[in-house]
Amino acid sequence: MFTEKIILHGKFKTACIFFLAVSFTGLAQTNLIQSTGNVGIGTTSPAVPLQVKGDVILGRGSGGNNFMRIHSDINGVYLTSDDPNTNQKHLFLRASPTNANGKDRHLFIQAGKSNGNWITRMAVMGGGNVGIGTTGPTHRLHVAGSGKWTGNSSSYTEIHSNGNGQYLRQFANDGTTQSWIIRGYATGGVQALFNSGGINVNGTVKAKEVNITVSGWPDYVFRPGYKLMPLGELEGFILENGHLPNIPSEAEVTENGVRLGELNAKLLEKIEELTLYTITQEEKINALVIRLEHLENRK
């Protein structure tokens, strides 16, 4: 019976000689080459052309001792890149394209089945896009479903969606208290919540307090030596330019917007200048009143 199982032809003669050598060392009960061509190592009933029962090590041909090991235990199956010393190397999984500059072959990771068919959970496209939950990613990272980023404690950030649309939210260190949420839709007119406060996108910004830091504040207007523009000169500037000095024009605001801190400082400068104008006019009015009273008394 033994010789019947190993009678092979042509290119299998070498394998037969190897098998004979192994069998004569007392290992024939665990290694077998069937007449069908199937080879079993560690098993006498190989179901495929090469079936190995046990670990497999594929060593480097020359220049080093690093190797790839295929092994399994009670928890699962492992593919490991290793080295008997400390010269470990990288592990590459490749999908070769059809030409030297091709991007037409992709890498798919499958787990789980539906109606007996494997489900692709992750796809790395030849062009570089990565899809999770989709096999046709349109961006460098395309996730079809929700995403979660955990923090040092139980806090985490979540990207999710419901029937109204997408939202991004953060949970506090207890993992249950919502710190803030930004929605792509509005609930009660509010599209973003921060600790029970609110921001209406494309609407009013609601906040308990806004603290804007600026590099300077116009107290210099009240310092000795500050020169106010004469009112006649100020009138001429307004007639020519259509806005106050040191204040952006409508065209500038339309094109560039405004910086609130900077604009508030400029507006305060104008208020302080207006205060000085008012004080000066008050002084002139008082002088005129005294002069009138003096003239009235001379009658």
Image (cartoon, rainbow, N blue to C red):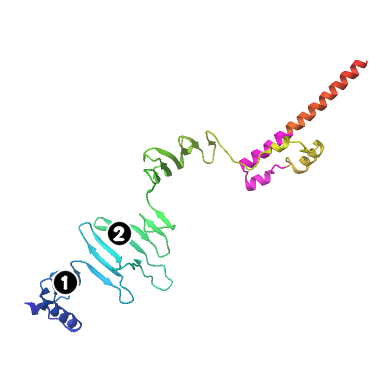
Callout 1 environment at 10 Å: few (<14), some (14 to 19), or many (20+)? Answer: many
Q: Which residue is mark 1?
A: 40
Q: Residue at x 25, y 66 (%)?
A: 70
Circle 2: residue type: Gln
**CA–CA distance in space, label 2 to label 1:** 27 Å
Circle 1: residue type: Gly
Instruction: Measuring from the top left, give residue 87's x and y in whole percent.
Output: 34, 68
| Residue 164 visible from this viewpoint | no
Mark 2 or mark 1: which is in front? 1
**Quadrant of the rendering where the C terminus is positioned:** top right
Instruction: Measuring from the top left, give residue 246's x and y in whole percent.
Output: 71, 42
Side (left or right) of 237 relative to 121: right
Q: Quadrant of residue 270?
A: top right
Tell me, yes or no, whether the two marked residues, 2 and 1, touch with CB atoms within 8 Å. no
Callout 2 environment at 10 Å: few (<14), some (14 to 19), or many (20+)? Answer: few
Residue 23 in magenta?
no
Kindly identify which numbered label has been placed on residue 110. Answer: 2
Q: Is residue 110 above or below residue 231?
A: below
Instruction: Measuring from the top left, give residue 120's x and y in whole percent.
Output: 32, 58
Instruction: Measuring from the top left, give residue 110's x and y in whole percent.
Output: 30, 59
| Residue 239 visible from this viewpoint | yes
Which residues, given as a range, are shown in magenta? 246-273
**Quadrant of the rendering where the N terminus is positioned:** bottom left
| Secondary element at tag 1 | strand
Q: Residue at x 85, y 24 (%)?
A: 288
